[in-house]
Image (cartoon, helix red, strand yellow):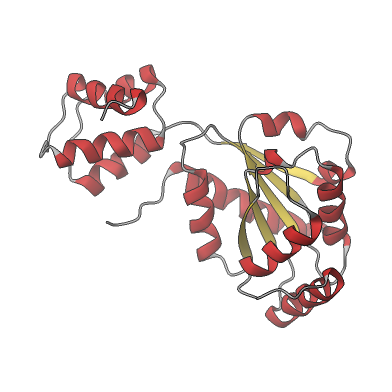
Amino acid sequence: MKEIKTHAYEIISLAVDAVINNSLERNFPVHGAIFADWGVGKTIASRQVAKEKPQVFYVKVAGDGSLTAPRLLKDFLYAMGIGPMRNFLDNLKLLERVIASKGLLTPVFILDEFQAVASKPTILSFLKDLSENPHVSACYLFVGDESLEGYLKGSHSLYERVKIKRRIPKMTEKTVKALAQRYEIELPKNFMEVINSLGATTLDVDFALYLAKKAQINRLDKKTLKALLLKVKEGVL
C-alpha cells in the first residue's frame, strides 16, 4: 500500500531542516527536539525523513536502561550503513572517516524514544563530545514523548544547544484525508469532530479505516466512524 506523508513527517522534516540551517549559519552544531504522544506516527515519519535526506540518520534508542556510549556509537555506525569494530576508539575513528568520506558538514542523528536516556549523564556527555568533535560535528533531533520536554530543562550543557522545539499534534485534517484517500474511503462531513472528541491518533485512524476497508465500507458516516475508532481504542477487534 502506498506510503503517505503525515503531519508528523512534515513537522519532523522541517525541524531537521531548521537544525541543519541553524548549524550552518552559526558554524556550530545546533540540536532540536520533537514531543509527541504515542501513536502519532513519529517513528515512521522519522524513518521517512532519514531515508530521504542523505545527511540524516535514524537511531532507535534502547529503552531498557542498558544503553551505553560504546553501544550508541555502534548504533550510529549501523545507521550510516557501516559495520562497527569492537573497540570504542576504533569506532570513533571510523565514524570520523565515514563522515569525512561522505562530505557531511552537518550530520543529523534522529534519536527516537530519547526520553529513555534523557537523564543519563554518560550518554549525554558522550553526545556532547561527539557534537564538539570537529571531525564529527554531530547534530541531534531528540524525538520522544511528552516527558522529554521536562528532561530538556535539566542542567546538562548538551541541552543548552537545543534551539528547535516542536510538538506534533495527535491528528490533523490533512493527515486524515490522506489516509482516507489511501484506503479509498469517503469521509463524513465534520469528521474531525469525531476524531478530536475521542483523542484519536494517526495510528487509531489508520487502523479504523483499515477495518472499514476490510468490511467493504467505502463511505463512512459519523456514527460508523466513531464506532470503528472506539473498537480500535478499546482493542475490541
Foreground of the two, 235 or 211: 235
Q: Eyeballing the image, is 154 above or below 28?
A: above
Horizontal and vertical percent position of residue 68: 78, 53
Foreground of the two, 58 or 105: 58
Horizontal and vertical percent position of residue 139: 74, 57
Rendering quarter of residue 217: top left
Residue 121 relative to residue 57: left or right: right
Which residue is found at the position 21% from the left and 37% from the top? 211
Q: Eyeballing the image, is 179 above or below 90?
A: above
Asked whether the viewer can see residue 22, the reply is yes
Horizontal and vertical percent position of residue 174: 36, 39
Horizontal and vertical percent position of residue 140: 72, 53
Which residue is found at the position 74% from the left and 28% from the top? 150
Number of marks drawn: 0
Asked whether the viewer can see residue 107, the reply is no
Which residue is found at the position 30% from the left and 37% from the top? 207
> Of all residues shown, which one is farthest toward the bottom?
101
Which residue is found at the position 54% from the left and 44% from the top? 11
Foreground of the two, 85 or 137: 85
Q: Eyeballing the image, is 133 above or below 204?
A: below
Question: Which part of the image, by quadrant, shows the C terminus?
Answer: top left
Rendering quarter of residue 84: bottom right
Question: Which part of the image, by quadrant, shows the N terminus?
Answer: bottom left
